[in-house]
Amino acid sequence: QKRDFAAAAAMVARAPLFRHLDPPQLAELTALLRPRSLPPRYTVTRPGEHGDAMYFIDEGEVVVRARGGRHVLGPGSFFGELALLEGRPRSATVTTLTACRLLELGAGDFHRLLAGDERLRAALVGEARRRLGDEEPGRP
């Protein structure tokens, strides 16, 4: 368990979104993450589903299919934050390409973290806006 916690903390610390967090904040965030090991070709999210969590990729790759196209994400990336930020149903299908180890952050914990950290909220909102811009028709 200690090794899993240390590995999760290292992955979270590498994510650009969390670089500003100090060690106690990283430990708090890491303690909230639930590991999920998934096989290849497993559908993690579907359009229209209620967003109850966001995910960080610790190992493996997923493909995100949205109206704007197809994007492959690997270790250190995250997905699922848009539905949580916007309070709307999910807009993309996310499927594992390979066996994956994901770290899941539940919606309640997500909102508590954002309420306590304006820099984190701003970073997530900025990433969400960038991703929404990428999904507009006619954009690369």
Image (spheres, rainbow, N blue to C red):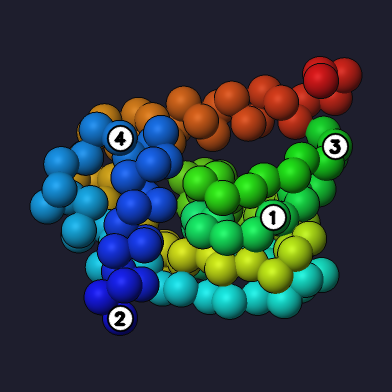
Q: Nearer the viewer, mark 3 or mark 2?
A: 2
Q: Quadrant of the C terminus?
A: top right
- The label on residue 61 is 1
Residue furthest out toward the left: 24
Taking the image as drawn, is residue 87 in sight? no
Q: Is residue 60 visible?
A: yes
| Residue marked by disc 3 | 69
Of tags 4 and 2, the one toward the viewer is 2
- The answer to the question of whether label 1 and label 3 lie on touching residues, with beta carbons closer than 8 A, is no
Give the spatial CA distance, label 4 vs label 2.
Answer: 24 Å
Residue at the image position 25 percent from the left and 75 percent from the top: 2
Task: Please give the residue where the numbered disc 2 appears in the rendered image.
Answer: 1
Q: Residue furthest top?
A: 139
Q: Quadrant of residue 94?
A: bottom right
Which residue is drawn at the image coordinates 81% and 48% (left, top)? 65
The secondary element bearing badge 3 is classed as: strand
Residue located at (12% from left, 52% from top): 24
Indicate whether 27 appears above or below 130: below
Badge 1: few (under 14), some or many (20 or more) residues near its Cα, within 10 Å?
many
Amino acid, disc 3: Gly
Which residue, given by chain and number where applicable, does mark 4 sit on? Answer: 19
